[in-house]
Each structure stands twice: as structure tokens, then as C-alpha cells.
């Protein structure tokens, strides 16, 4: 998250220093299921092609998976729909690769930006703030142990679940703790590759065990060299030496096969969300602000969205064209989205799957089981299509009455305040996303000239970075159902109109967090 934030800030003319404990990359395959939205970030950060070039699996392997009842040798199985099903609503296609692949590219991109400095191998030891700024004591852990104090206007803690920055600020976290130890292993098995030929080629494979009451046990492909990762619940006292990890794999697959483990680690199954994402000049993002099980690939994608949401707001405040209310909107927008993800997309799903998998035994009541399995299949499809983060309740957008910020919504091409803009081509063949940049953009589709002029004058008066893109309301652009669409610097819609404008200055002041 930190490297993405540093890139975004640098491109907006803000200098920063990244303190990163790891000098290099770890080879644990986390954060693989990247959404279309995440690839849009890479596009705007100037490295999307380079990121895609690091993909380890062929592009023919989509993000879908297989879910089977009991074991992967069961006759009861189905193929899930991946993130590709919502691809038409984004400017970039989704992709799949371990975090160490795309983070390597982001580090290289960061090195090209003079305003983005990095201290790899350094660690923060203490953080303090006052009304004038923040001070961070850092130490060169990978080198000579040198200690320095850095001063800045703001600090953003992207330092994980045990965040020093969060603890120093006094921000607390709470959520659902399932009191369950999970294991993550990495292994290689050409024999498993052969077994999986009974299924369509997929990214992930999961077996539903009624005894686990909804807890996931699943594995996925890493590369074309028969390497896989594997997650599953294990007893609380499990260590690397006292547990038969291969035996557990064999049980889930339903067959024995040779496998060579290269990594085994453990994590706790819980959902935690910070009570607030900001304390004066201290912000938190990514796992420091929220953490949850790796179910559905929400973690790294939400963290990068935190960075994109916060970067333009910090830049606006530092450059002087926004008030503190804009910084307040970071918490008000991002925290409800993740809380919705954790409690209503993940925790409630675990409970739902546990109940459904135990409802009927396929041997004792095949008809009842078939009905429950059909319900399971239908509900699994909704898991992807319902994830449409939006800020309808944000104080800096003109959302609907009673709107709230949440992770769930409905995909549509209609431009709606608080929602991500959908892609459409302009008359010159360029996509609307190719017109978006560092400031606000007003799309004017057959809009009244006086309305457009009012916005231009207001933006000049308020000194808000602003651009007007005029075109006709046809050839697909009528799908927006608006003649005027004001887009924020993070590609979300702030305001729409059929052409009428009552007070352009008031609209821009609200969208920019100006009192």
C-alpha cells in the first residue's frame, strides 16, 4: 500500500519518504486476485503494462474456481464465476499474480519519481505528532543500525495488522474473531496437476466440509510449474512439526499424491476494522486499518483503494485548494466500505455456508441436498457481482437521500454520484478514462454552454484543478443518463445533472471539501 501511495502522491507533486522494513520481496503468494479497479490504479500510476508482464499464469486461466462438496473427487461440484463478469464496467481488465510480482514493478516505478524517496531495510521505532506536524524515529535495521528523526506534515501507517503507527495514535480495532488458526502452505505437485484435469482449468479449487461450519479450505495455482498455495483451518496447537499437512491435502482432494512443501505458516481467522482511519495528522491504510481472511481477494485490493482515495485528498490539502473536511472524508468513505466487506460479505458468508452445507446429507436426503446445493451455487455467484464499493453517503458527493457508503451495490453504466465511473468512448475514439488526470473533470455531453462556463469560472475562482471535456450524448454515452458529470481525481462521480446548474461554485466547494 505504501509504495502505491508514494507513487500517487509524487505524481500529484507531493514529496514523501517510504519506510519499508523489507529490502527485497518475500515469495509467499499473497494478494493474487486483482480486481479491475486495482489495474486501473496501475494504469494511472504509469505501470499497468509492466505489471501485466509479470503474470505467472497464462492469460487463458481466469480468476474463476471450482467448489466441490466433501472433496475434489466428489460428483457434486461447480465452476464459479470470476471477476471477469463485471469487466465491462471498468477501464482495465482484472488480472492474477502474487503480490511480490506487482510490488516489484511498483518499486521500480517509484524509483523513477524524484519526489518519492524510499528507505528499504529501515523500520519506524516511534511516532509523535503536534499541531505543526509529525516526527518519526527510524532505524536502519538492515544496515549499520543508524537512527534518524524524520519530520513531515502527515504520516500514513501502511504497516500491517500490528501497526506501530496505529498504536502510537491510540486508534483501536474491533471486529469478529472466529478463534480459529489457519495455515498457509506452498507446495509443488505435478501429480495434483494431473488429478485436476477432471475440471476446467481454474485459478482456485475449494472443498466444502460440513464439519468446518463454513470455514474455507482451498488452494490455487501460482504458476505453470505445478506450484500451488493452500489455506485451511488447523488445530490451535499445530506447528510445522506435529501435523500431517500432506494428509490434509489428500483428504481435501480425495486422493493421495506426492507434494513438496516449500513453506508453511499460520494466521488467525478474524476480521478487524479500526474505529477510525485518522487521528489528526496520522492516517492508517491497508492492513493497518482493516484485516480479514483471504476470502475473495478483498485485502490487497481494498488497501490499494485506500491509497488512491487518500492520495488526492492529501495532495489537495497540501497544495491549498481543499480544507480539512476533505481529509475527514477519507475515513467517512473508506471505513464503512471495509466494515461492509468484513461483516456482510465475509463473516455473514461463513455463517451462511456453514448452515447450508449442514442442511442435508447427500446420501440420506439426496433431493434436499440437491436443493441446498443449487442455493449454494446461486449465492456464490452473487459473492462477486454484489461487490460494487460506493460512497453514496459521503459528505463530498451529491448522493441520493439516505445514501450510505458501502461495499455492496449494483453495477450499471448510469453515472451516479458516489459510484465509480463506467468506461465509454468519446467521438474521437478515446475512452473517457483517458481524459482523467490529477484534478476534477467535467464531462459535458450536449450540455448548455452557460452551465459549462459557470463551472469553468468557479474552478478558476476557487483555484481547483479542473478540465472540461465536451462531446455529444450519443454512441453509447447516453448510457450515462446525464449531460453533466463531475468526476473526482480518483475516478468517482461527485455530481451529475441533466444540464441544469444552480450554483457551480457551491458544487465544486462541496466536492473539494471546501467549507
Image (cartoon, grey):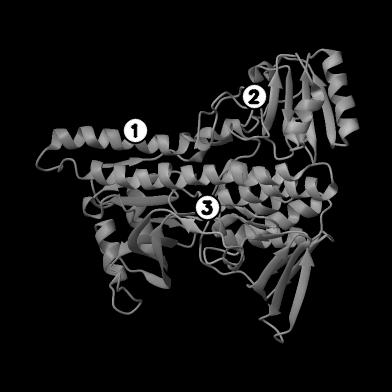
Q: Tags 3 and 2 in contact by the CB under 8 Å rule?
A: no
Vertical placement of residue 121 versus 378, above or below:
below
Q: Quadrant of the C terminus?
A: top right
Q: Quadrant of the N terminus?
A: bottom right
Query: Does residue 458 appear anywhere in the picture?
Result: yes
**Disc 3 on helix, strand or loop?**
loop
Q: Earlier in the sequence, mark 1 or mark 2?
A: 1
Q: Position of residue 316 (x, y in %)?
A: 79, 45
Q: Residues within 10 Å of mark 3 (few under 14, many from 20)?
A: some
Q: Does 405 sit above or below residue 21?
A: above
Residue 255 - label: none
Q: Tell me the distance, in whole angstroms, between the alpha carbons under discs 3 and 2.
A: 31 Å
Element type where label 1 sits in the image: helix
CA distance separating discs 3 and 1: 34 Å
Q: Quadrant of residue 445?
A: top right
- Residue 275: which numbered mark, if any? 3
Q: Are marks 1 and 2 in contact (CB under 8 Å)?
A: no
The circle drawn on residue 415 is 2
Q: Identify which residue is drawn at 61% across, 47% down.
A: 331
Please indicate whether residue 440 sits to the left or right of residue 197 in the image: right
- Location of mark 1 (residue): 378
Left or right placement of residue 311 versus residue 229 in this view: right
Using the image as rendered, state which of residue 113 and residue 399 is in the foreground.
399
In the picture, measured across the screen, residue 351 lies left or right of residue 86, that is left
Q: Quick one: label 3 or label 2, which is nearer the N terminus?
A: 3
Amino acid at each position: 500500500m505504501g509504495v502505491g501511495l508514494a507513487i500517487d502522491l509524487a505524481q500529484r507533486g507531493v514529496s514523501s519518504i517510504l519506510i519499508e522494513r523489507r529490502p527485497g520481496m518475500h515469495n509467499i503468494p499473497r494478494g493474487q486476485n486483482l480486481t479491475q479497479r486495482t489495474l486501473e490504479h496501475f494504469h494511472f500510476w504509469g505501470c499497468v503494462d509492466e505489471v501485466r508482464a509479470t503474470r505467472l499464469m497464462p492469460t487463458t486461466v481466469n480468476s474463476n474456481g471450482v467448489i466441490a462438496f466433501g472433496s475434489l473427487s466428489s460428483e457434486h461440484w461447480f465452476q464459479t464465476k470470476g471477476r471477469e463478469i463485471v469487466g465491462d464496467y471498468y477501464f482495465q481488465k482484472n488480472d492474477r499474480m502474487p503480490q511480490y510480482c506487482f510490488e516489484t514493478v511498483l518499486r521500480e516505478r517509484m524509483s523513477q519519481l524524484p519526489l518519492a524517496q524510499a528507505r528499504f531495510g529501515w523500520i519506524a521505532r516511534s511516532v509523535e505528532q503536534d499541531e505543526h506536524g509529525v516526527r518519526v524515529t527510524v532505524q536502519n535495521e538492515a544496515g549499520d543500525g543508524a537512527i534518524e528523526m524524520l519530520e513531515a506534515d502527515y504520516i500514513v501507517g501502511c504497516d500491517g495488522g500490528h501497526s506501530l503507527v496505529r498504536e502510537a495514535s491510540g486508534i483501536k480495532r474491533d471486529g469478529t474473531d472466529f478463534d480459529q488458526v489457519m495455515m498457509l502452505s506452498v507446495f509443488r505437485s505435478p501429480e495434483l496437476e494431473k488429478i485436476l484435469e477432471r475440471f476446467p482449468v481454474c485459478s482456485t479449487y475449494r472443498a466444502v466440509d460440513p464439519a468446518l461450519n463454513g470455514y474455507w479450505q482451498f488452494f490455487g495455482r501460482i504458476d505453470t510449474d505445478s506450484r500451488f498455495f493452500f489455506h485451511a483451518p488447523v488445530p490451535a496447537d499445530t506447528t510445522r512439526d506435529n501435523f500431517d499437512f500432506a494428509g490434509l491435502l489428500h483428504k481435501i482432494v480425495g486422493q493421495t499424491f506426492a507434494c513438496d512443501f516449500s513453506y508453511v505458516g499460520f494466521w488467525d481467522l478474524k476480521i478487524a476494522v479500526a474505529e477510525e482511519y485518522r487521528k489528526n495528522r496520522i492516517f492508517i491504510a491497508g492492513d493497518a486499518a482493516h484485516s480479514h481472511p483471504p476470502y475473495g481477494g478483498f485485502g490487497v485490493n481494498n488497501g490499494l483503494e485506500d491509497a488512491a482515495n487518500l492520495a488526492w485528498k492529501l495532495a489537495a490539502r497540501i497544495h491549498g485548494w481543499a480544507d480539512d473536511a476533505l481529509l475527514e472524508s477519507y475515513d467517512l468513505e473508506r471505513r464503512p466500505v471495509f466494515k461492509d466487506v468484513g461483516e456482510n460479505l465475509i463473516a455473514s458468508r461463513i455463517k451462511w455456508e456453514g448452515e447450508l452445507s449442514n442442511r442435508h446429507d447427500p446420501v440420506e436426503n439426496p433431493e434436499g441436498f440437491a436443493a441446498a446445493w443449487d442455493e449454494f451455487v446461486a449465492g456464490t455467484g452473487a459473492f462477486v457481482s454484489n461487490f460494487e464499493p460506493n460512497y453514496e453517503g459521503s459528505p463530498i458527493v451529491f448522493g441520493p437521500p439516505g445514501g450510505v457508503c458501502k461495499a455492496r451495490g449494483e453495477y450499471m453504466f448510469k453515472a451516479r454520484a458516489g459510484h465509480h465511473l463506467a468506461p465509454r468512448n468519446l467521438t474521437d475514439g478515446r475512452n473517457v478514462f483517458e481524459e482523467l488526470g490529477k484534478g476534477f473533470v467535467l464531462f459535458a455531453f450536449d450540455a448548455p454552454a452557460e452551465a459549462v462556463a459557470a463551472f469553468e469560472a468557479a474552478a478558476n475562482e476557487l483555484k481547483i484543478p479542473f478540465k472540461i471535456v465536451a462531446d455529444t450524448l450519443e454512441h453509447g454515452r447516453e448510457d450515462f443518463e446525464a449531460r453533466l458529470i463531475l468526476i473526482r481525481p480518483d475516478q468517482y462521480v461527485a455530481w451529475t445533472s441533466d444540464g441544469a446548474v444552480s450554483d457551480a461554485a457551491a458544487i465544486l466547494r462541496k466536492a473539494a471539501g471546501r467549507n
